[in-house]
């Protein structure tokens, strides 16, 4: 079994099904550049500790650069024996520069600290690109909220008409959630930004490797504290899966709102044709597949997070091969997250709103709270005002009329405090403008939210 990097102690070839079962190259080849970056830094570190000469370092570095080029040009030929990206890169390096030198690269290193390093390097880049598009998503919501600040629509709780709100207020509720996601992503990044290299298989590094130097070379903020933990720890993967679950829940709820708002029954928004699909049977259909897929993929992502936590839960200390199962959920989740952000951004940028339908859906009973506040402003205790306004609602229902159609005479029978100025209550613009306290739905409050979110984004 000489073709395997670890073949020395083995007497017979690996079963061919076992070989296939064990192989991860088709998945972890995505780490090709990270793996080479890590190896180049490691080569420098072992030269620093006197394990290889300057010439040998030069040979290893240029060999690794060549392997990197092959990956870039897609000319790297994966071979049956390439178990994973680490063995594949080393096999190719050996072909290029010979075993006498290439054979020194792995001194003191294990695939255990190598893979943990590679995945962290990859994820750091991935988080950086997710942050860029997430910021664009938040910005596009802020821009739209700013443009359409004057549009008023019904706000719902329990999916029942509750109080009038600004459309922009609704939009910004998601911008704010996404800003929180950004904050969590930044926080999580700190824990990804820890270097495991130099931990060996589990016990550490016996060649006095300068790990701080390695961290500098690979642009890690910190080095790991404990080699047993460093090689067996995939918390940064579950963190990312958890983050993606929570983030995609936000996207899913946004989608659910928009799916409803786009029905003919609501008619508040219409999705652009380029984000919609038709029915193969019903010619009139225009379906919000984009949003349904976001909602659906959120479920898939939560499943990946649960699946990986289940993989972790019973593992003994340090590296176990189960950990190889981290990559499929991590890569697939990150890919889905990127696609979901891009689609959500496209949908939000291109949908049209129908302010007339939103206005038509506003009913006077949604001002019953304001009617109570009218009385509160005339010094009636809120609990009593609530009850009196409730009596007006009941009266309107009895008379099968709108809340504002209950006559002043009738109102005064319910409370002496009602006066001619009560007509001001029946105005939706007037209603939303009361909510001036920070976070509320008045124009100034929503504009301030847009301002705060934009500021946090560009801090
Ligand atoms: N392909 C492996 C993984 O992704 C690399 C580490 C293998 N280590 C080992 N001791 N077999 O986890």
Image (cartoon, rainbow, N blue to C red):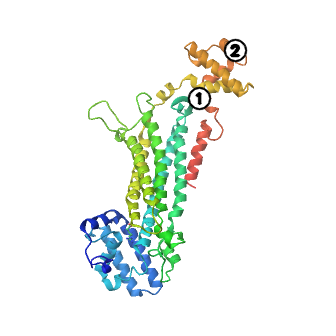
| Residue topped by disc 2 | 412
Residue 230 % position (x, y):
49, 69
Q: Where, quadrant-wise, is the N terminus in this rendering?
A: bottom left
**The CB of the residue at mark 1 lies under 8 Å from ligand 1:** no
Q: Is residue 314 above or below residue 291?
A: below
Q: Is residue 94 above or below residue 268?
A: below
Does label 2 or label 1 sit earlier along the sequence? 2
Residue 135 % position (x, y):
49, 52
Q: How many marks?
A: 2
Q: Where, quadrant-wise, is the C terminus in this rendering?
A: bottom right
Q: Is residue 108 above or below residue 252?
A: below
Residue 17 % position (x, y):
25, 65
| Residue topped by disc 1 | 429
Q: Is residue 309 above or below residue 369?
A: below
Nearer mark to the viewer, of 2 and 1: 2
Residue 429 % position (x, y):
59, 29
Callout 1: SS: helix
Q: Label for residue 153?
A: none
Is residue 126 visible in the rendered image? The answer is yes
| Residue beneath the point at 57% across and 13% down | 398
Left or right, 323 with reference to 78: right
**The CB of the residue at mark 2 lies under 8 Å from ligand 1:** no
Give the distance between the C-alpha atoms of the residues marked 2 and 1, in whole angstroms.
25 Å
């Amino acid at each position: 079994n000489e073709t395997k990097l670890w073949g020395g102690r083995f007497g017979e070839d690996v079963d061919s099904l076992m070989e296939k079962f064990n192989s991860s190259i088709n998945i972890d080849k995505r780490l090709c550049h990270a793996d080479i970056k890590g190896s180049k830094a490691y080569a420098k570190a072992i030269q620093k500790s006197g394990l290889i000469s300057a010439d040998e370092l030069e040979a290893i570095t240029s060999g690794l650069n060549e392997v990197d080029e092959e990956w870039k040009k897609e000319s790297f030929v994966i071979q049956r024996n390439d178990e994973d990206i680490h063995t594949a890169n080393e096999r190719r390096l050996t072909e290029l520069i010979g075993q006498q030198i290439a054979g020194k690269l792995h001194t003191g290193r294990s695939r255990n600290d190598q893979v943990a390093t590679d995945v962290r390097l990859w994820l750091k880049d991935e988080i950086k690109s997710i942050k860029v598009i997430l910021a664009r998503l938040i910005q596009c919501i802020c821009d739209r909220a700013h443009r359409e600040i004057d549009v008023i629509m019904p706000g719902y709780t329990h999916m029942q008409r509750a109080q009038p709100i600004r459309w922009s207020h609704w939009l910004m509720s998601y911008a704010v959630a996404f800003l929180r996601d950004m904050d969590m992503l930044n926080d999580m990044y700190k824990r990804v930004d820890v270097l495991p290299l130099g931990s060996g298989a589990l016990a550490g590094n016996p060649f006095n490797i300068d790990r701080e130097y390695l961290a500098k070379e690979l642009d890690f903020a910190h080095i790991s504290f404990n080699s047993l933990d460093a090689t067996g720890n995939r918390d940064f993967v579950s963190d990312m899966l958890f983050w993606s679950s929570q983030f995609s829940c936000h996207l899913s709820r946004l989608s659910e709102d928009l799916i409803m708002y786009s029905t003919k029954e609501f008619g508040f928004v219409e999705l652009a044709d380029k984000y919609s699909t038709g029915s193969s049977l019903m010619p009139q259909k225009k379906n919000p597949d984009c949003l349904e897929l976001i909602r659906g993929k959120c479920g898939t992502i939560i499943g990946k997070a649960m699946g990986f936590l289940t993989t972790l839960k019973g593992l003994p200390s340090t590296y176990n091969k189960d950990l190889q199962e981290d990559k499929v959920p991590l890569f697939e989740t990150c890919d889905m997250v990127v696609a979901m952000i891009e689609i959500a951004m496209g949908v939000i940028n291109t949908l049209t709103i129908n302010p007339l339908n939103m206005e038509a859906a506003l009913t006077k009973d949604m001002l019953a709270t304001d009617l109570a506040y009218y009385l509160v402003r005339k010094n009636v205790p809120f609990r009593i005002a609530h009850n009196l306004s409730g009596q007006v609602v009941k009266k309107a229902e009895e008379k099968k009329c709108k809340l504002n159609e209950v006559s002043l005479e009738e109102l005064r029978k319910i409370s002496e405090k009602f006066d001619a100025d009560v007509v001001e209550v029946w105005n939706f613009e007037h209603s939303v403008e009361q909510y001036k306290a920070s976070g509320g739905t008045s124009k100034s409050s929503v504009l301030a939210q847009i301002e705060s979110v934009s500021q946090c984004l560009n801090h």
